[in-house]
Amino acid sequence: MSENAVLTLPDGQSIELPVLTGSENEKAIDISKLRSQTKHITLDPGYVNTGACQSGITFLDGEKGILRYRGIPIEQLAENSSFMEVSYLLIHEKLPNQKELDDFHNEINHHALIHEDMRHFFESFSSEAHPMAILSAMVASLSAYYSEASGAASLGDVKQNAARLLSKIRTLAAFSFKKSIGQPFIYPRDSLSYCENFLRMMFAVPAEEYEPDKDVVDALNLLLILHADHEQNCSTSTVRGVGSSHANVYASVAAGILALWGPLHGGANQQVIEMLEHIRAEGGDVNKFVEMAKDPKSGFRLMGFGHRVYKNYDPRAKVIKGACDRVLAKLGVEDPILDIAKQLEERALSEDYFKERKLFPNVDFYSGIIYRAIGIPVNMFTVMFALGRLPGWIAQWKEMMEDPKSRIARPRQIYTGPIETPYMPIEKRK
Ligand code: ACO
């Protein structure tokens, strides 16, 4: 039986609005006819209460701290799966059988090289350039090489474009790192797994043999799985928003990469390590920084803390925190900032300020400590996030393009500027 909500407006008119229920019993009031029937719009800065789509990809319950991809709990995927399998699950809507997984992996390997001309683009970037700036520019440039991928046409071969993107972003990310340290590019090698291939392109040098460490490969798989999708966050909404104009998938993902870069979103993982290093440099006193975070006048926030949706411990942070000690011990790495991070968390969570606002560590709080332990430089952390989030962006873009109800994203506004004002000739202006 369909349910309705009734909205009564100040002018006395009243409208019935359908109430939709999701598969996990979340409720939404469908306001799609509101403006045409009442001339009113809704106002919701930051879209805190606004659902922009119906999606079957990721479920998250911020109050209970639940995250599932296609119904499968993130903890089970982290324990048992690989990044390739999770990418398949997100994009192709089910776990692959062995043959499907092998074919998927082979197709990804097949696309690992970038056009040789694109190599030369790297020469033009300053060695100071942030790798996120390079990555977004290079991913946008892919549109110039795969022009058949323009707009809705790229939906015709999602499989191929998804494989191209997943594969080439890895090569581009590694090349941007090599560029920044002045080492020669290392070309991809098909016999390796996704993560091994990436690590080799990052850390091998032509003069030496390179054997990826199994513990490092496992840690990378884990981190990429945990970042693979997170429903309608800022970067994913950007990918959907840009794609809704039928811009091609490369352009849409390049825009998502730039949205991710911001320090309030994926850029926080770099900021967390910089904050922890700063605390260490100041003698390791976490109290001072917690006090600063509580003071609205300080303008300082605990990076890696708080989340728009999670009002409970972020389940991804729980898994990563658990993995931190294990991975560092296996790799024989002792990192003093892990202790500082734990002290900071303990101190913050004991404070009413954080309890009342339900602020917990998010995915970015501990991830950087593992990235650092496996040799990823701090300015590459957000690039690593982009690599992990890519299958989610592709799956969300595909779902939107295939949804017959999708329309170009075009929010409204309440205008607060001057009312009609006549043009004044320049000689009469003060
Ligand atoms: N440190 C101190 N106070 C905080 C923090 C923090 N990290 N986060 C939120 N608050 C406070 C705010 O000052 C505000 O207090 P008030 O009610 O007294 O004004 C209250 O908690 C609510 O915060 P909002 O900014 O309104 O929450 P919003 O949902 O808009 O923002 C966000 C969420 C951006 C993640 C925020 O918590 C933040 O800036 N965190 C630090 C950056 C970060 O870690 N980002 C990564 C998020 S995860 C991801 O994107 C992958």
Image: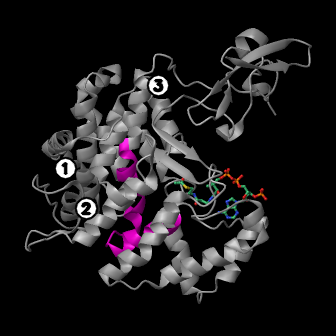
- Magenta stretch bounds: 365-391
Dot 2 alpha-carbon crowd within 10 angstroms: few under 14, some 14 to 19, many 20 or more: many
Q: Going from the N terminus, do you reach mark 3 or mark 1 first?
A: 1
Residue 250 appears in view: no
Mark 3 vs mark 1, CA separation in Å: 32 Å
Q: Nearer the viewer, mark 3 or mark 2?
A: 3
Residue farthest bottom in this picture: 283
> Does residue 40 appear to the left or right of 109 in the view shown?
right
The number of discs equals 3
Where residue 68 appears, as percent x and y from the top left, is 48, 46
Mark 1 vs mark 2, CA separation in Å: 11 Å
Taking the image as four quarters, which one is ligand 1 found in? Answer: bottom right
Q: Main secondary structure of the magenta part?
A: helix
Disc on res. 179:
2
Residues marked 3 and 1 touching at CB (< 8 Å): no
Residue identifier under label 1: 120
Q: Going from the N terminus, do you reach mark 1 or mark 2 first?
A: 1
